[in-house]
């Protein structure tokens, strides 16, 4: 029986934004859209070869209630947090940080010129996990398994599994899959996404067509796919994209600044705890 194909149902218009100490970025998804993209909360692209756009970095700041995933494309960043974790994020490396009940960290550029390019994803935690211990996983590019595709191209398996290969990241409560996919021009890709998962596609480089309707996906575009199971892509040019899937949590979301909880009272408590030094 042929599997129903997932089609694009929503496009997220990225908007210019600033974060940290003045880093210029494109906000592709923000927490106000989280119900549509559950369990994903936010996705930012930082991409510039002008040092003034990124040099100030993201000095020490708190988080509670979710996970952050930073995927580097080019350039180098350093991570440091109040739990004693450090990380050196180079090209094609990934950082997976579980803020949970509270963490204070910084991400600072390790360059004064050249291209700095990457993505930061916020992934929600269910209520039962929001006040658990924080954690950190620094994933070097060489530790991310890769599966070649017939006809060319490959899948880098950051989280989840593909073709029986398990990703480098530890299993998440949302059963998240995160693939870094490269397709040469003309190559097709078909994959059965987990049933019931939210599926997002982030165009990184080039252009593709998605689903049986052959809807376009270009670089710097984020799209949501609808119900179904089969994901079908064909590359119009040499193309690279991120495939993100996760099991929806279906709980109330109260997001303010660096905190994402289930109620406004819990957000206020997060601010109180941070100010009192309880992170």
Image: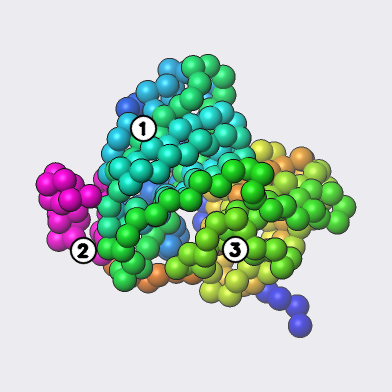
Residue 157: give x, y in percent of width and height.
Answer: 65, 55
Residue bearing mark 3? 160
Separation of marks 1 and 2 at Cα, in angstroms: 27 Å
Q: Which region of the structure is painted magenta?
A: 254-279
Q: Earlier in the sequence, mark 3 or mark 2?
A: 3
What colour scheme does the image use? Answer: rainbow
In reply to whether residue 66 is colored magenta, the answer given is: no
Indicate whether 106 appears above or below 189.
above
Residue 202 appears anywhere in the view: yes
Residue 99: give x, y in percent of width and height.
Answer: 34, 53
Quadrant in which residue 100 is drawn: bottom left
Residue at the (81%, 43%) spot, across then down:
185
Q: Earlier in the sequence, mark 1 or mark 2?
A: 1
In reply to whether residue 266 is colored magenta, the answer given is: yes
Indicate whether 195 appears above or below 53.
below
Q: Nearer the viewer, residue 185 or 162?
A: 162
Q: Quadrant of the N terminus?
A: bottom right
Residue bearing mark 2? 263
Mark 2 Cα shell of 10 Å, populated few (<14), some (14-19), many (≥20): few
Residue 201: give x, y in percent of width and height.
Answer: 59, 53
Separation of marks 3 and 2 at Cα, in angstroms: 30 Å
């Amino acid at each position: 029986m042929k599997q129903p194909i997932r089609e694009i149902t929503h496009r997220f218009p990225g908007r210019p934004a600033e974060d940290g100490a003045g880093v210029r970025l494109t906000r592709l998804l923000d927490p106000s859209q989280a119900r549509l993209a559950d369990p994903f909360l936010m996705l930012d692209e930082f991409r510039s070869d002008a040092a003034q756009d990124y040099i100030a970095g993201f000095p020490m700041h708190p988080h509670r209630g979710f996970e952050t995933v930073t995927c580097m494309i080019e350039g180098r960043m350093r991570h440091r947090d109040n739990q004693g974790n450090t990380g050196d994020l180079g090209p094609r490396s990934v950082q997976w940080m579980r803020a949970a009940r509270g963490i204070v960290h910084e991400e600072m550029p390790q360059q004064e010129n050249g291209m700095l390019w990457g993505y930061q994803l916020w992934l929600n935690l269910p209520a039962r996990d929001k006040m658990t211990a924080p954690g950190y996983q620094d994933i070097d590019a060489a530790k991310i398994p890769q599966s070649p595709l017939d006809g060319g191209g490959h899948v880098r398996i950051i989280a989840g599994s593909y073709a029986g290969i398990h990703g480098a990241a530890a299993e998440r409560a949302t059963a998240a899959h995160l693939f870094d996919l490269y397709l040469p021009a003309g190559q097709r890709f078909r994959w059965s996404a987990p049933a019931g998962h939210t599926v997002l596609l982030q165009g990184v480089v080039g252009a593709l067509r998605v689903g049986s309707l052959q809807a376009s996906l270009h670089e710097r575009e984020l799209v949501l796919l609808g119900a179904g199971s089969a994901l079908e892509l064909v590359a119009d040019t040499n193309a690279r994209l991120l495939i993100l899937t996760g099991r929806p949590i279906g709980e109330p979301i109260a997001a303010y600044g660096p905190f994402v909880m289930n109620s406004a009272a819990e957000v206020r408590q997060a601010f109180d705890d941070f100010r009192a030094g309880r992170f």
